[in-house]
Amino acid sequence: MALEGNLKDFGLADILQLIYFQRKTGILSLRGKLDAVRIVFLEGNIVGASSKRREESARIGRMLIQRGLVTEPDLQKALEVSKRSAERLGRTLFEMGKVPIESLLSVLAEQMTQTVVQVFNWKEGSYEFVAQDITVDSKVAVSLDTEHLLMEGLRVTDEWTYFEGKVNLNTIYERTETAAEDLDATDASVYAQVDGHNDVNAIIDITMMDQIETARGVVSLEEKGYIRELRTREVVHETAPVRRRAKVSESSAFSLMGTGFILIVVLWVLIQGIGIGQFVERFDQGVALEFLRIKAETYAVRTGQYPDTLDALENVSAMTRSTVFRYEPHPDGRGFRLVAAGEDGVLGSDDDIR
């Protein structure tokens, strides 16, 4: 399955739905202004997630120390062993007998969840999913239910709308005065990391609180006058690496693929007895139909029910404006029926697409 494009046109929620429902195995690469994230899938569920900006081993190490599961000396020793053996830190700690497997899996699952959920708030960026075989470490294996993570991501996205314009994740704060001793746990954790160097993203990583909880603490402290904005950290945009292939091989491959595809299309059109224009139109309508199905499923995950009409779905006009659809939610609320009018534009005729 080749899936790539811009997050403005097809958001992370839609991408996760598509991979989950089709039970795909492979790697989803996401590149935005602030970060580059890699999500690994096995039969539709997430088995790995890493961030270029947030070093995986450093984050896991801080989480384990914060929970009292390892000591600083043990962590440093494990990092050295991990570097020499090229094994992941989690597996190294487990093999050294420093962390119980249940605790380690819990921390790994939390780290993966935080990595994926933060992408839901990206306003722009590119994505590419490559279907490929995945090898999972059987001793230290974590699998996140994609549908559950999707619900968590949509929840965070909804709550983040309150903080838009109030908190910038790249903003660095400084203390203005000593805070009162009766701060609640969230405010106290955030205040402890405000030092004129850490931006909000760094505070999230250090405290291991989620994005919403940290933002709530920042707003609270700023309103009380304990902290103020110092500056916003400049974001460095990295250039995507160029994929280098032999020019002759690439040219030959595309030539063969293109010729093969054209032959298949011509044969199919001849067998069906339709014109090329009709084929293209029917193909476009099929894509639009699948796009609406994914949007409706995403809406149900976000709200707990399927939409009453297609008008409730967002950002679908560009994809579907040239096609007539009939949408009927099931009375029991467990699904829906969606049909596209075919080339004749009339619902109920023989060329309808289901």
Image (cartoon, rainbow, N blue to C red):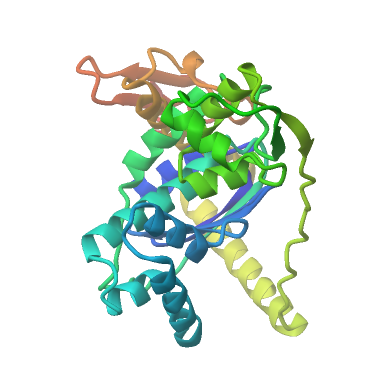
Q: Judge whether 347 appears above or below 122 on screen.
A: above
Location of residue 338 by image quarter: top left
Does the rendering let one see residue 163?
no
Which corner quadrant holds the C terminus? top left
Residue at image point 58% right, 27% down: 179
Q: Between 4 and 200, which is closer to the camera in this rendering?
A: 200
Residue at image point 76% right, 44% down: 233
Residue 234 x/y as whole percent: 80, 46
Q: Between 252 and 185, which is closer to the camera in this rendering?
A: 185
Residue 145 x/y as whole percent: 30, 47
Q: Residue furthest left?
A: 332
Residue at image point 22% right, 60% down: 102
Residue 95 falls left or right of residue 170? left
Location of residue 293 by image quarter: top left
Q: Residue furthest bottom?
A: 84
Q: Judge whether 97 appears above or below 227 on screen.
A: below
Q: Judge whether 108 appears above or below 160 on screen.
A: below
Residue 156 x/y as whole percent: 47, 31
Residue at image point 37% right, 34% down: 151
Q: Judge whether 144 appears above or below 316 on screen.
A: below
